[in-house]
Image: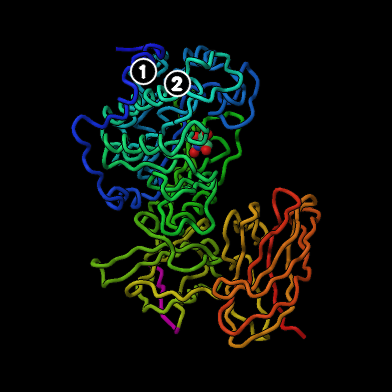
Amino acid sequence: MRTTIAATAAALTVGSMLAFAPAADAPPTVPPKDQRMAWWREARFGMFIHFGLYSTPAGTWDGKPVGGVGEWLLQNARIDPIEYEKTLVPQFNPTKFDAKEWARIAKDAGMGYVVITTKHHDGFALWNSASSDYDVMATPFKRDIMRELADAVRADGLRMCWYHSIMDWHHPDYQPRREWDKRPVDPASFPRYVDFMNAQLRELLTGYGDIGILWFDGEWEGTWNHDWGKKTDDFVRSLQPNIIVNNRVDSGRAGMDGFTADEHARGDYGTPEQTIPPNGMPGKDWETCMTMNDTWGYKASDQNWKSPRTMIRMLCDIASKGGNFLLNVGPKGDGTIPQESIDRLKRMGEWMRTNGDAIHGTVASPFPKQFRWGRVTAKSLKGQWRDATRLYLHVFEWPADGTIRLEGISNPAWGARVLGDELRKVAAATEGDAIIITGLGATPVDTDCTVVSIDIKGVPAVQPFTVKPAADGSIACMAGDAVVTGSIQYEDRFANLGWWRDMASTASWPITLSSKGTFDATIDYAASAECGGTGEWQVRVDGAVVASGAVELPGRKDWGDFATVPLGRLTLPAGRAEVVVKATRKNGDSFINLRRIDLRPAR
Ligand code: FHN
C-alpha cells in the first residue's frame, strides 16, 4: 500500500518511536566487531555510487550551470523542494541502467563492496518505498534499482551496502528547513521525521538481503545528536546484527577528516572524505571516500579527472596506512557510468589483477614513516608459511641501481619477488639493521607502481625512525622524513609539507645524537603573499619541551617561491630528542610549505 508523506506522518505520529522498536523478537546479539569487520578489512577497496534525481540535470537548472557538486543541486540552486520533485521525478528515466554492468565494473576493478545512495539529501528514494510516494516508482522508470543492484552485486560475490542521508531537504518534518523553503514549519516534528527515516531503514534492512554497511551521512545539522545516533545505531543492528555502521550515524564527526571527536560516539569506522590522513588513524578502522573528479553526483561540466596513476597510488597509500579506499562513480541520468570512470577503473583492475595480494587483507606498514620511493603494506602468514610476515613494497620511484634498502629492521628475510615478473631474479638479505633487496633490474614492471614482496621471519622488529647526522655533523630534516600531525600532508610537487591549515598541526623529526650538540638551524619554506606567519621551533625530550624559539616567516611570491632563512640556535641533548615546528600565527588560511630544516654545527 503506497502512502503520501502526509498520511505517513500522521500514521507515524501514533506509532511515534515505534520505529525504533527492534526486530520482532529480542534482537540477536551483535557479533564482535573483529568478526563483523573481517570482510571489510579483507576488501580494502570499494565502489561508492552517487545516483538519483540530480543525475538527470547533471549540474544545471533552468538550463543554466549551477556551481558546486552535482548532488547538491537543490541546495546550490536554492530550489523549492516541491518544485524540485515535480520537475525531476517525471524526468528520471535511466533506461540504460544495467545493474549487472555496474557490478561487473566494480568486480573487475578489484573492488569488494558497493555503497549506493539509497536516499541522498534531496530525500528521493531510489527503491520501491512503502513509506513514501517520493520514490523511484513515481518516475517513468518504475523499477526498484536497489533490488536489481543488490542481486547483481551479490551474484558477482561483492557486498551490497547502503548509503543513507539523515539530512532530508524534502521531508516536511525534517528540520532545519532550507531557508528558501516556504512550507510552514509549525507542523514539522523532528521525532516524526526520525520515525519516517527508520521506517525506510526498516524497508532497506529487511527487504533486500544481507547488507554489508549502512553508510550514514548528513549528520552534521544541529537537530541530529548523540541520542538519536545511539538509538538509530541500535535499531539498525537489531535488524541486521552483522552489519557495519560508519561513524556518521552519530554526531560529533570532526569535519572532513572523518575523525570522531567523542570516543563514546557510535560507528565502526572513521570516514575521512577527499583526504588521506597523513598518518592514517592508528588503532582504528577508517575509510577514505574520494571522487574521481570533483563531484559525487554526475555533473557534465566536471572534467577534472584524477589520473589512473594518482588513484592507484592513493589506493597503495591508504592501504599502507591501514585504511580502505571508497572510490566514487556518479552515473549519468541515462543510467550509464561515465566512460572516464570506466577507463580508470579498468586500469585499476589491470593493476589489481597483478598486485591485489598487496592490497586485499593487508595491514598498515610496520615502519614508523613512509619511504620516499613508495609505500609498504604487510600481511601475516602465521600458521601458513614458516611463521612469516610478508611485506609488500609498493615502488612508485624505481631505483636506478636496482637496490632498495629497508632501514631500521633486523628480521631475517628471504623470498623476494617482483609481482608481475616471476622470472626476475631478486634477493633479500638482512645486514645489521637493514634489509637489502637487490637484483630488481633497471626497469619497473608497472611505471605507476611495481610491487616487490619479501618474507621476513616472525613479526617485524622495526626500530623507531630517527634522523642521523651526516659525517660532517650536519643534520638534514627533510619534508619526506617528517612525522606530521593534523592537516599537514606531504606533497610531491616540491617535495614539501603542505596543507598546513590547522594551528594544532606539527611537523617533527626524531634525532638521535651520541653527544650533546649546538646547531645553527635554517628553514627552507615558501608561502603565497597573503600567507606565512609566525612559527615556533621546539626541542622536545620524551615529549617535554626543553627549548623553543620564534621565527617570522612572511608571505613570499607564491607556494613555490622557496627561501632559506635562519631559524635560530638549537642545542640538542645526547640521546633521542625531537625537533618540532608549529605555527603560532597564520596570516592566511594556510601557514607555509616547508621543504627542509638544516642543522649545522655552530661555529
Ligand atoms: O553532502 C554529502 C556529499 O553530497 C557526499 O554525499 C559526501 C560523500 O561522502 N558526503 C557529504 C559531504 O560530507
- Relative to residue 31, is residue 330 drawn left or right? right
Residue 427 included in the magenta stretch of the image: yes
Q: In which quarter of the image is residue 18?
A: top left
Q: To which residue does mark 1 refer?
A: 13
Front residue of 41 and 109: 41
Front residue of 431 and 472: 472
Residue pictured at 40% horizontal, 28% vertical: 118
Q: Looking at the image, is mark 1 or mark 2 earlier in the sequence? A: 1
- Relative to residue 5, is residue 382 drawn left or right? left
Is 423 rendered above or below residue 132? below
Q: Give the mark count.
A: 2
- The magenta segment is 423-432
Residue pictured at 29% horizontal, 38% vertical: 237
Disc 2 element: loop
Q: In which quarter of the image is residue 230?
A: top left
Residue pictured at 61% horizontal, 88% vertical: 515
Q: Position of residue 562 (x, y in %)?
A: 76, 61
Q: Residues within 10 Å of mark 2 (few under 14, many from 20)?
A: some
Amino acid on which disc 2 is placed: Ser
- Relative to residue 9, is residue 568 drawn left or right? right
Residue pictured at 66% horizontal, 61% vertical: 496
Amino acid on which disc 1 is placed: Thr
Q: Where is residue 537 in the image (x, y as percent from the top left)?
A: 69, 68
Disc 1 element: helix
Q: Is residue 339 visible to us here? A: no
Q: The C terminus is located in which quarter?
A: bottom right
Q: To which residue does mark 2 refer?
A: 189
